[in-house]
Amino acid sequence: MASDHVSIDPLAALLSEQPTQLLSAWELHSRIALLEGDARACRAELESRTTTLVDLPEEMQQLVFGQLCNALDPRSAVDFSSVSKGLRELMQRVGEGAGKSLLQELKEENAAAAALCRTVRVRSCKELREAKEIHRYGNSRYGAGLSATDLATLGKLLPVLPALEWLSLTEESDSAGPDGGQRLVQGLGVGSLPAVTCLVLRNVCMGDAGASALAAALDRGALPRLECLQLSAVAVGDAGLVALAPALRRRPALKELYLDENRFGDAGLAALVAPPPADAPSPQAEVLSKLKGLNLDSTQITDDGCARLASRLRSGALPALKDIYLQDIPASDAAKAGVYDARADLHGWEESDSEGEELPG
């Protein structure tokens, strides 16, 4: 009789038409034993597969746990580590000189993420994880501004916000400090913010180092669908725009670029609108081919910069450009007029205002 039961699927046997109260104690015990044996076998198989992760090179382990250790949803890392000795050891291991294990760091990051949600008026980590738009306007009416620590926390979370399409941060204070913008973007990597089409940072100081960090993130593959970029009053100088310009020129979908109220002048502008190298392949030869709007208000562009821009426009650069804004710059009215005369279809603030056009954010 025992041999008849051995070949029967244990779960099916327990759920068979025969009521369990008709089974003898020995039969019930043997079927439960089979279930326990199957459970142990499954657990051993899972452990044998996941334990091999610790044999991977260090950089691959970091990649795996970078995906598992999501501060907005830490359950995956905890669940996986609970069924694998190898993963559990890796989660609990304190790296040399680190002082904290991955598990400790994950707990702290989850607490920081929850606090950030309250700061940006999002009800929960789940809501932030699923958000399509984040608009933050920091002033005395809407609450204290984001600190550099807040921006660093948000920067760590950006790679795990796949649904986000629009990110807009505007500050009226200097609460973010001199490197808040840099700390926001420096963690963006391959595929980060895959759905974002518009990024707006206004008065979130980046400086030249932050512009370089954003350039590096773009070159790593972050923000692949970016169409609108506003970096207004973020303290970017010539060195920063020279570093950022090549990455922007490799963004074929970019349609709107707002760089107003920054420190750069002719050198930064020259890097942005420079002709492509003579040996550049055809797709790269048409840089910024979809750019429709360019805001250069309140920068340090002089007559020389305007002359260079006008020359490039006459030669066919920025073929889709319709709106260019040059208010409050050192250049003379005649030099600015030369830019608008370079192509008949260019407009400035006056025409855009009459049509009711609005800036993003």
Image (cartoon, rainbow, N blue to C red):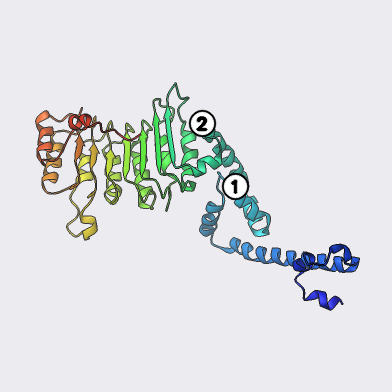
Tell me where residue 198 appears, x and y as whole percent: 36, 42
Q: Which of the 4 quarters of the picture holds residue 110?
A: top right
Tell me where residue 59 appears, x and y as whole percent: 51, 57
Q: What residue would you read off at disc 1?
A: 74
Q: Residue at x 40, y 34 (%)?
A: 169
Q: Residue at x 37, y 33 (%)?
A: 205
Amino acid residing under circle 1: Pro
Q: Nearer the viewer, residue 79 or 166?
A: 166
* Label 1 with label 2: CB-CB less than 8 Å: no
Q: Quadrant of the C terminus?
A: top left
Q: Is residue 160 left or right of residue 308?
A: right
Q: Residue furthest front?
A: 17
Q: Quadrant of the N terminus?
A: bottom right
Q: Which of the 4 quarters of the picture holds residue 104?
A: top right
Label 2: element kind = helix
Amino acid residing under circle 2: Thr
Give the CA separation, mark 1 to mark 2.
20 Å
Tell me where residue 144 appears, x and y as whole percent: 47, 25
Q: What residue would you read off at disc 2?
A: 119
Q: Which mark is residue 214?
A: none
